[in-house]
């Protein structure tokens, strides 16, 4: 136990990096996921194909491979970015596929008549998506999106493997000094569980507040 | 106002509209009747391009209906549509339903949209429901809200696709009354309906469709008293005995 308490500042630093990774990559994933979803339901065949290819690609590659490729491969071709930034971008692009998948199931749950009524009023495809279809779709997929958020939080720990000093890397460092893996990693695990629990609490609240009256 | 010339429509191999010609004059109310599957909805949906036409011409106000883009959105803004299943936006209040398109498409200010929105809701008799969500309204109220939503765009033409078919019988009257009022105010209307009473009361002309063709067209009383074609006679016999 003292192994953890003695190193609280390191854990705290690591936790902050994990929170940054999580928040920034979730925001990026949400934005990219929205764009991919719009492409996948658009009337333009080429856009639909690109959207589908995107989702298929990222769902069929391991995140760790992508991280390693980006961190060690990009400098080779002359693209230099900070380690944390690279990790955020890769995690965001990867999780965007899962967000797009969740959003699309939400769009499919909205009856076709909603989009038709919007277009019949003269709204463009983009306007009907933005003002009519997506707001309703979102309300039906709060829970799945919460699950993507939790999975993303856990996945940020893979950034430790490419050198980002997040919570997992901090725990690893402390363990190298103290050699007490059980309290150290249980402590780190509890911190992750706490983030997940908060996410679960928030999605539950959101779902009750925004749940649709049909 | 609307001119349809030689309209054909296919769904895959299925030839749904055959050489349909139809003219609707400004202020005219045309009722379209015919058996289920005869292509009435498809015709309506072609008029505002919710379905693309296979071949033929559709002119709205003398201008060919645009195929896509901004021009198409403008056409749709001028052609109001009321659906059998209401299709009110479920996540918005009745008032917000009525305000959305004028603000986003016509660029009307929020205050102006709200003012006309409330006026229209009063006109269709549901002013007190303005703050409710669609799911909290009866079917008849929802359909009246949908009519108000379409009217908010100040359309040149209104299309109704079986607006009372999804309603409980006791609510049909309230919706038809609103439509009769619109017709009396001079709105150009194309109405797909099985309500013969409405056709007699409000229509200038009845168009009978069967198998994707316009089989007969005539002035309502003449059509209902003495249909000229066997198919129309058979259909009326079936509908009127119910
Ligand atoms: N989206 C569609 N895809 C394929 N077939 C369709 C579609 N919509 C309608 N149809 C077919 O077109 C024909 C005419 O349908 P519709 O216009 O809905 O008739 P009505 O409104 O007179 O009942 C029917 O045979 C129907 O099955
Ligand atoms: Mg129909």
Image (tube, coloured by chain):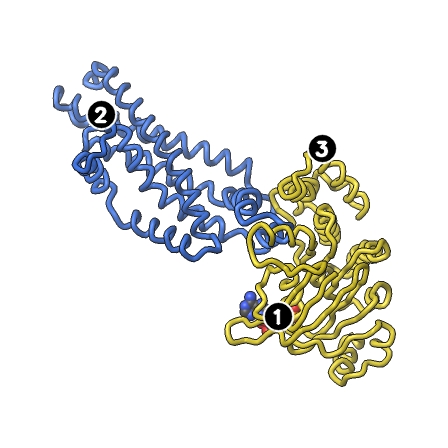
Q: How many C-alpha atoms fall within 10 Å of the one at disc 2: few (<14), some, or many (≥20)?
A: many
The residue carrying mark 2 is A165
Nearer the observer, disc 2 or disc 1? 1
Query: Going from the N terminus, do you reach mark 1 or mark 3 first?
Result: 1
User: What residue is drawn where x is 64% and y is 76%?
Assistant: B19
Label 3 CA crowd tier, 10 Å (few <14, some 14–19, many 20+)? few
- Chain on which label 3 sits: B
* The N terminus of chain B - image quarter: bottom right
Residue indicated by mark 1? B56
Q: Position of residue B67 (x, y in %)?
A: 57, 59
Tell me, yes or no, if residue B138 can be seen here.
no
The chain painted blue is A
Q: Colour of chain B?
A: yellow
Query: Which residue is found at the position 21% from the left and 23% from the top?
Result: A170
Relative side of A116 to A190, left or right: right
Q: Is mark 1 within 8 Å of ligand 1?
A: no
The residue wearing badge 3 is B111
Closer to the camera in the image, A61 or A73: A73
């Amino acid at each position: 136990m003292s192994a953890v308490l003695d190193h609280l500042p390191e854990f705290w630093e690591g936790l902050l990096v994990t929170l940054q990774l999580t928040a920034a990559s979730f925001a990026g994933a949400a934005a990219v996921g929205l764009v991919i979803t719009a492409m996948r339901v658009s009337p333009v065949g080429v856009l639909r194909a690109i959207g589908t290819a995107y989702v298929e690609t990222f769902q069929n590659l391991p995140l760790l491979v992508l991280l390693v490729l980006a961190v060690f491969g990009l400098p080779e071709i002359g693209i230099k970015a900070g380690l944390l930034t690279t990790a955020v971008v890769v995690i965001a692009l990867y999780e965007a596929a899962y967000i797009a998948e969740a959003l699309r199931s939400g769009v499919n749950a909205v009856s076709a008549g909603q989009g038709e009524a919007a277009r019949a009023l003269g709204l463009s495809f983009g306007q009907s998506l933005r003002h009519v279809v997506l707001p309703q779709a979102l309300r039906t997929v709060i829970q799945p999106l919460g699950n993507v958020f939790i999975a993303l939080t856990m996945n940020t720990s893979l950034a430790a493997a490419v050198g980002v000093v997040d919570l997992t890397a901090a725990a690893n460092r402390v363990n190298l000094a103290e050699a007490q893996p059980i309290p150290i990693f249980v402590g780190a695990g509890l911190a992750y569980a706490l983030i997940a629990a908060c996410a679960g609490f928030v999605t539950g609240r959101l779902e009750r507040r925004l749940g649709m009256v049909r | 106002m609307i001119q349809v010339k030689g309209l054909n429509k296919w769904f895959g191999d299925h030839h749904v509209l055959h050489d349909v010609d139809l003219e609707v004059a400004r202020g005219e109310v045309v009722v379209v009747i015919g058996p289920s599957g005869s292509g009435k909805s498809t015709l309506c949906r072609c008029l505002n391009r919710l379905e693309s036409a296979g071949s033929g011409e559709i002119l709205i106000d003398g201008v060919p209906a645009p195929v896509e883009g901004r021009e198409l959105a403008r056409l749709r803004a001028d052609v109001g549509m009321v659906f059998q299943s209401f299709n009110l936006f479920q996540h918005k209040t009745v008032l917000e339903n009525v305000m959305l398109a004028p603000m986003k498409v016509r660029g009307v200010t929020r205050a102006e949209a709200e003012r006309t929105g409330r006026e229209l809701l009063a006109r269709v008799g549901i002013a007190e429901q303005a703050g409710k969500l669609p799911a909290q309204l009866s079917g008849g109220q929802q359909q009246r809200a949908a009519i108000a939503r379409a009217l908010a765009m100040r359309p040149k033409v209104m299309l109704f696709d079986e607006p009372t078919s999804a309603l409980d019988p006791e609510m049909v009257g309230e919706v038809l009354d609103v439509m009769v009022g619109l017709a009396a105010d001079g709105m150009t209307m194309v109405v797909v309906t099985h309500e013969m009473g409405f056709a007699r009361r409000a229509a200038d002309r009845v168009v009978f469709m069967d198998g994707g063709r316009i089989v007969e067209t005539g002035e309502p009383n003449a059509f209902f008293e003495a249909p000229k074609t066997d198919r129309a006679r058979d259909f009326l016999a079936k509908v009127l005995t119910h």
